[in-house]
Amino acid sequence: MAVCARLCGVGPARGCRRRGAAREQRRGGAGDSEPDTDTDPEEAGGGGGDDEEAAAAAERIEGGRPASHLAEAGPAGRAPLSLLELPPELLVQIFGSLPGTDLPSLARVCTTFRRILRTDTIWRRRCREEYGVCENLRKLEITGVSCRDVYAKLLHRYRHILGLWQPDIGPYGGLLNVVVDGLFIIGWMYLPPHDPHVDDPMRFKPLFRIHLMERKCATVECMYGHKGPHNGHIQIVKKDEFSTKCNQTDHHRMSGGRQEEFRTWLREEWGRTLEDIFHEHMQELILMKFIYTSQYDNCLTYRRIYLPPSSPDDLIKPGLFKGTYGSHGLEIVMLSFHGKKAKGTKITGDPNIPAGQQTVEIDLAHPLQLPDVENLRDFSELSRIVLEVQEQVRREEQEQEHRQEEEEAASQPAAKPLGGEGAEGEETAAGAEGTTQDKAPASQPFVLPMGVISRNEDYPRTCRICFYGTGLIAGHGFTSPERTPGVFVLFDDDRFGFIWLELKSFSLYSRIKVSFQNAEAPSREAFDEMLKNIQSLAT
């Protein structure tokens, strides 16, 4: 701030303003460099009458015509001593290259800067570079809305809700992506493809949108229902949490009543009618979900989620995947890596394992060598291999606990990291993993054992490598949860599977291939904290 003031010839020191006025008088100016104290981004460049010089400069820049006095020097041919001696066209270019959040402070320096900051060229550039608005913003002139209005009253004001969010819909959760779409901010709810087509692309529908109808303020509209956009409200509770509310819930109702609403929801959610679903338990689960989620059609709270950070040592690229979960249909799972562990966290869930819970955990220190295809068809043979590894893991954990107790008794700090075999054991496990991957072929035949149920029979028939893992199972209402042994099967960079031994069930997961913006975690610690928070809410 002080630097800007000195550059423009206005400073806090005594006599600074007189020197600035004298300099303006020498240039034939009117000495209009009075300090301004406005710091609101919405007011940057606002107030006062129209500045013809700045508008003319903007026209020259936007029209692509060279500025006639762009290279002119200051009085008497000397170099300019302050920014005020620079041509307005050059100031527009300089100010346009600054972050939009810095411009209010610049507008506070003097009225000349404030008038120049009313030039729409500056704000058009900030909208494009900071928020990716590629629309022809000159069309806004027809509606009387300026690019500065779009930046300050729409993009900047609602910047904190851009990114990925998980709605609080009980055990079901969800995935919301809030993006800048043209001259709108839209909240898209992402839905898995219809069961069991796990490789199909994601579906999405708008839940709300925000745009400028006039210069006063942004308008929030609810997009739920089948009667078009209607009045809504958004409240930003805090940086990582916001809520939406519909003010006209009658737009959500259908003329045929709840029965018509249910059949419409069923076609959208499952791609079929109730008559097509013969499994009685599945019918109950579907009806239960409709009744439960319908309670949240007027008010929802969202909490921010981040995409998992990646590392060159990761088995595959972490991210979001669609997975099959029996009668519950397809659900969204986030795969993340944590040293010698990989975790699958539910973003959407069900009454048994709710959203936010860790559905699978993969022990990357314990690869599995599957038998040949003929023996793999025998479920008892696969079960024997997995249970042997489970016993080995249990013994390693007991030995680790025993070593820690001995170290504490000796009042010595633990010198070995946590792991199956301590420091040496972890190196051995890591070496074994590396050796297994080095010796394993690029792909090996794979087939599900007899008796293992899969919602999708079109799973890959070759895999890269398998690991021991555990899967979380529970009764309805997340009662009696327990981790049971299973097999993690890596097929390729975008697909993996998990065999649940106790359930004799197989889940197939396929990567969600969507480029989400504003979803990267600021740090590993922030991502771990996010995982902890959504799991605690689910519990």
Image (cartoon, helix red, strand yellow):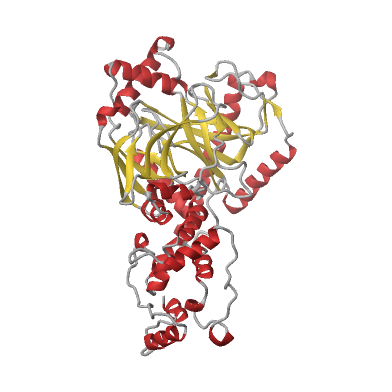
Q: Is residue 436 left or right of residue 151?
A: right
Left or right of 135? Residue 168 is left
In the image, taking residue 453 as reference, residue 220 lies left or right, namely left
Is 394 placed above or below 414 here? above
Q: Is residue 483 left or right of residue 424?
A: left
Tag count in the figure? 0
Q: Height in image: 374 above or below 184?
A: above
Which image quarter holds the C terminus?
top left
Between 159 and 415, the one lying in front of the other is 159
Find residue 249 and report its image quarter. Answer: top left
Image point (54%, 58%), residue name: 62
Q: In the image, residue 450 lies at what x, y percent?
A: 59, 16
**Nearest to the observer: residue 175 or residue 470:** 175
Identity of the residue furthest to the bottom in this view = 15
Vertical order, 276 against 354 (above or below): above
Residue 2's image quarter?
bottom left
- Location of the N terminus by quadrant is bottom left
Question: How far from the left and from the top, in percent, is residue 22?
Answer: 41, 88
Q: Is residue 273 visible?
A: yes
Residue 525 percent location from the top left of the image: 47, 54
Q: Which of these two is toward me, 185 or 442? A: 185
Residue in the image at 55% along x and 20% along y: 456
